[in-house]
Amino acid sequence: MHLGERLRALREKKGLTQTEFAKRIGIPNQNVSNYERGFRQPDYDTLKKFADYFEVTTDYLLNRSNTPTMSEQEEFEAFTNNPDLERWYKELPNSDEEDLEALKQMWEIMKKNR
């Protein structure tokens, strides 16, 4: 299965036409058609849009994995290896209890709103 087939299956699973999907992620409808038929490959930013929209990994879209989402361990490793988050992650244990509780509450709200 190639990227286009995965993309089409995910789109159809959500009950979207190519036009509706293209509009939701902000790209031309013809591009979606070309990606699905294998006539064109998306750039990095567009691939990320697809993964974010369908809540799957880019590896899944690129057929490098048959698992659409990361395991908890993979998510944790990706988080801890993200240079943008590394400093924050290292400073977290030094936070006071009140800040940690506020952070926990914000995280719970974010998870509910997914």
Image: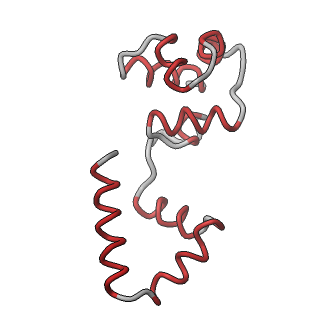
Quadrant the N terminus occupies: top right
Point 50% across, 39% down: residue: 52
Quadrant the C terminus occupies: top left
Relative to 109, is 11 on the left or the right? Answer: right
Does 51 appear above or below 30?
below
Q: Position of residue 113 (x, y in %)?
A: 31, 47
Relative to 108, is 60 on the left or the right? Answer: right
Does 20 appear above or below 70?
above
Does 113 appear above or below 62?
below
Task: Please give the count of numbered marks on the rendered protein.
Answer: 0
Point 36% across, 22% down: residue: 14
Q: Residue 46 is drawn in which quadrant?
A: top right
Point 57% across, 35% down: residue: 49
Q: Position of residue 2 (x, y in %)?
A: 60, 25
Does 101 appear above or below 51?
below
Q: Position of residue 38 (x, y in %)?
A: 66, 16
Point 32% across, 83% down: residue: 98
User: What colouring does the structure picture have?
Assistant: secondary structure
Q: Position of residue 18 (x, y in %)?
A: 51, 12
Relative to 64, is 14 on the left or the right? Answer: left
